[in-house]
Amino acid sequence: MTTLVATQYFDFEADFVEDNIRCIPMIVRFKLDACGIKLKLSEWSKLDSYEREVLANMTGDTGDEVVRYRSYLQGLILSRTGQPATLLPPTNKPGWSVLSDIPHSIKERINELNKSITLRQWQRLTILQRFALFKLSSGGHEHKNFLKALVEFNLA
C-alpha cells in the first residue's frame, strides 16, 4: 500500500500544478534525486493525473520509503514507456544539503538580480526550499521562477 502525505507545492509552481500537474513539481524532483531516477518530461507526460499525484504525495524520508518510491516509479516508467528508468549516479553531498555555504549557482543568480542572501537566511530555509533554489539556479534551467521563489521564501 502506498503511504500518502500532504503535498507541498510552491506558489511559483501554481501555473503548471493547477493544469493537471503538467510539469514535474519540486517535491517530485526532490524525491527523484533521493531515489536516483531521472524522470524525463516525456515520461511524466505519459502518466495520468492520479499517478502524478501519487508520486507527489508518497513519502520518501526513510530508506525503506525511498526504496518503495524507486520501485513504484520504475514500474510506472516501464509500464508507460516500455523502457527501463534512467538511473542517476548517487550524489554524496548535494549543494542544497550543505548549510555551511550558499551554492555558487545561487549566489550568481542572486547577484544577477542585484539581491543578496545571508548564510543565516540560507540555513533557515527548509531543505525543500534550498533544493528548489538550487534547481532553479542550475545551468540547465531557464531561471524564470528563481525570483518568484526568492519572493515566496521571503528573500527578496
Image (spheres, grey):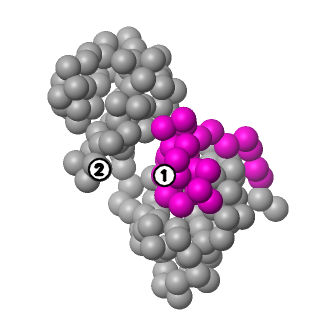
Kind of residue indicated by mark 1 = Arg
Between residue 60 and residue 21, name the one nearer to us. Answer: 21
**How many badges with numbers are in the image?**
2
N-term-proximal mark, 2 vs 1: 1
Circle 2: element type: loop
Q: Which quadrant would the C terminus be assigned to in this image? A: top left
In the image, taking residue 114 as reference, residue 71 lies left or right, namely right
> Relative to 32, does residue 40 appear above or below in the rendering?
below
Kind of residue indicated by mark 2 = His
Q: Residue at x 48, y 84 (%)?
A: 83
- Label 2, label 1: how far apart the Cα atoms are: 13 Å
State the residue lying farthest toward the bottom: 82
Please state the horizontal and vertical placement of residue 132, each as a whole percent of the image: 43, 38
Query: Residues in magenta?
Result: 3-30
Between residue 117 and residue 12, name the one nearer to us. Answer: 12
> Label 1, on which residue?
29
> Label 2, on which residue?
141
In the image, taking residue 102 as reference, residue 10 lies left or right, namely right
Please state the horizontal and vertical placement of residue 16, each as a whole percent of the image: 53, 52
Q: Residues within 10 Å of mark 2 (few under 14, many from 20)?
A: few
> Relative to 136, does residue 156 appear above or below in the rendering?
above
In the image, taking residue 138 as reference, residue 132 lies left or right, namely right
Q: Residues within 10 Å of mark 1 (few under 14, many from 20)?
A: many
Q: Is residue 43 magenta?
A: no
Q: Residue at x 69, y 52 (%)?
A: 58
Q: Is residue 27 magenta?
A: yes
Judged by depth in the image, the label closer to the viewer, 2 or 1, is 2
Please state the horizontal and vertical placement of residue 140, each as a whole percent of the image: 26, 53
Q: Hey, which quadrant is residue 94 in on the image? A: top left
